[in-house]
Image (cartoon, rainbow, N blue to C red):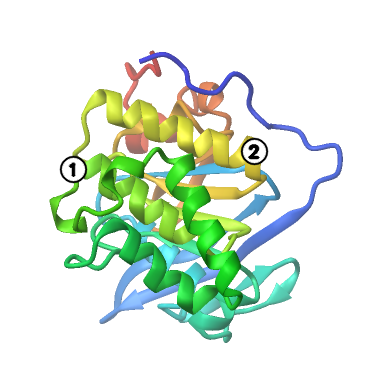
Amino acid sequence: MAIIKKFRITNFKKKTEILRLEKISVYFNKRKILEDLNFNLQQGEILGLLGPNGVGKSTIFNIITGLIKPNYGSVYMYNKNITNDPIFERTKKYKIGYVPQHGGYFHDLTLRENLKAISEIVIEDKKLRSEKINLLISKFELEALQNIKADFLSGGQKKRLVISLALLSDPNILLLDEPFAALDIMTIKNLQQIVVDLQTQNNISIILCDHQARDLLSCVDIAIVLSNGKVIAKDTPNNLIKNIDAQNAYFGDSFKIN
């Protein structure tokens, strides 16, 4: 598959750190999930998380959203410690959007009804709700699907719906948990383009994790490889696959993006 991004944001004239995880450690029943994990996200950056199963990628998302509180360490948004802030406050005040790997929608509601239901929670102005719903339906080419129940949508259509639901609240950060899982090649390519467009057109900072390493590396600016609960390598995609630590822990020595 061809490289999706025509450019990668690797240097910022004015670096603005939007999110930072500092010395994060998480244990479940004395089992180490994350240990002394550190990384940050710059404004307008697409960051990818890679690593084997069970390395803690989804746990990181749960920590950012506030679903899980770390045993040790802190989460910062715009240099403010939000470690103890509840989920709803992170969503409304700091505008963190989340697209889960599975679900994320009301199965028995139509696509439009899903958007209407969530819009009533996150948008106070009734006129603005309708305008935003119509804009998202148009943006993601969902016009022909708006009266179909979510359960009957294809995998790619469901993914576009859930991304639309996350965008209703105008997030500053969008978390995408395995967006390319179990999708066909053309659908993945379309979703990659959606991710890049959200960065370039909406200036949304994005973190995504996926086991489809090539697909992830084709649309991110920076990627991280996790191993044993820690960040062992962080770099641009082309540099990361040459990193010895990343090769030993995840890629192997013959992996190529193209």
Position of residue 75 in the picture relative to residue 243 (left or right): right
Quarter the N terminus occupies: top left
Relative to 248, does residue 70 appear above or below in the rendering?
Answer: below
Q: Position of residue 214 (x, y in %)?
A: 36, 26
Task: Provide the residue designation for mark 2.
Answer: 201
Q: CA distance from mark 1 to mark 2?
A: 26 Å
User: For the residue labelled by badge 2, is the local secondary structure a helix, a strand or a loop?
Assistant: helix
Relative to 251, does residue 122 appear above or below in the rendering?
Answer: below
Q: Residue furthest right?
A: 14
In the rendered structure, which amino acid carries the disc numbered 2? Gln
Task: Provide the residue designation for mark 1.
Answer: 154
In the rendered structure, which amino acid carries the disc numbered 1? Ser
- The residue sitting at 64% across, 45% down in the picture is 202
Q: Nearer the viewer, residue 26 or 63?
A: 63
- The residue sitting at 49% across, 28% down in the picture is 243
- Residue 26 lies in quadrant: bottom left
Position of residue 81 in the picture relative to residue 15 (left or right): left
- The residue sitting at 85% across, 37% down in the picture is 13
Tell me if mark 1 has few (under 14), some (14-19) or many (20+) residues whose alpha carbon lies within 10 angstroms of its own.
Answer: few
